[in-house]
Amino acid sequence: MADPIDILLQADVFAADPDNRFFRASEICLEVLLRRFPAYTRFLDERGSGVPRELSRESLQTLPAIFLPVLKTRAFDLPRDVPIVVQLTSSGTTGKPSVTPLDEPSMKRRVQAMLASYRAAGIVSGSVEALAFLIDPSQTQMAGSVVIDAVLKASPEVRSVRYLVRQGPAGIDFALKDAVTAIQEASARGPILLVGYPALMAAAMHGLATAGVSRLPLPQGSMVLTGGGWKSFLPGVPLERDDFQKRMAGFFGLAPGAIRDMFGLSECPAVFVQCSHGHYHVPAFAWAQAIDPETGCDVAVGEIGLLQLTVPLTTSYPLLKILTTDKVTIQRGCPCGVAAPYLTPRGRTTAARFETCAMKVGRAVSA
């Protein structure tokens, strides 16, 4: 009998709303987590909501979310009978890095989910060489490098992957000259996919311009996929998403729709990839809500709330339903024709403001 969680990954990626497959997968995911993590059961009990026997949109709405910042200081003990194959970390650009332990099924589903989103968004639709502005995954456990590496290597369309950033003794080592040479050489062989940190891509573009290359049209079929922080790599060189994408389009001779960004969290297996109109659509294996953290209720369509995510793909850690510090709006009706809702990131809020007793896991984890 097929696993309901795996069945969910076969759904139309950009379906309009979570369907019965989503709620069935959520039930199975919750069952496994409750069996493996007694502290998670205590957390739910302390909230006084009880554990629903069947999950629907209404009952899943009442399931308590775990506030992500708390997990950085209060970790769940891992079951001894669950072999962890990787412990993904966040970049830690906004504080202490988070750690997400994954067993083999959870890691496999994460890769399948990201690859499905890539395909649905048209990111890997033709033969390309990938140049990754990311740390070599052999030197890091950062989620971006490890998962993207697995996704690219699982894509027959990607002929090769070359990493342009290394973890040196003194920190990150980014050889600008080597990156520039790699772009020039790869583009002479055919379409390429530039993927990774936008700040490093901006540095490469700046390096080319400094070397006298004011424009480097990439072969037809090439794409740029950014992900990660938008902090500037070069002192005094501002980096803003819309401006960056316009400059990249002009410099590399690409249509605006060939330059996309992806939004995600190391704790969440779902990634939100921009469509050709620049909107981050929610895949079918995720339920994204913009909520008022004081009431736990959805805000009105188009209003700013905190991003709450329900994603039933991770059974190695209690991340079924999480509340983030990311501010977003959620809307529908994208001109690209996709029925799925889309979210728009609106920055982050201060975690301390919302660390209410209702969101904490501290007492349950410490018990």
Image (spheres, rainbow, N blue to C red):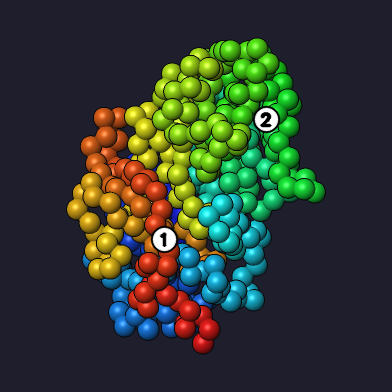
- Which of the pair 131/103 is nearer the observer? 131
In the image, what residue occupies the spot 28% across and 68% down? 294
For mark 2, what is the residue? 160
In the image, what residue occupies the spot 47% across and 82% down? 364
Q: Is residue 81 above or below residue 182?
A: below
Mark 2 residue element: strand
For mark 1, what is the residue? 350
Amino acid at the residue labelled 2: Ser
Q: Is residue 184 above or below residue 364?
A: above
Q: Position of residue 25 (x, y in %)?
A: 39, 61
Residue 348 visible in the shown view: yes
Residues at marks 2 and 1, CA–CA distance in whole angstroms: 41 Å
In the image, what residue occupies the spot 54% across and 67% down? 72
Residue found farthest to the right:
169
At label 2, counting other C-alpha atoms closer than 10 Å, the crowd grade (few under 14, some 14-19, many 20 or more) is some
Mark 1 residue element: loop
Residue found farthest to the left:
300
Q: Is 185 left, or right, of 95 in this rendering?
A: right
- Which of the pair 130/238 is nearer the observer? 238
Q: Is residue 27 above or below residue 166?
A: below
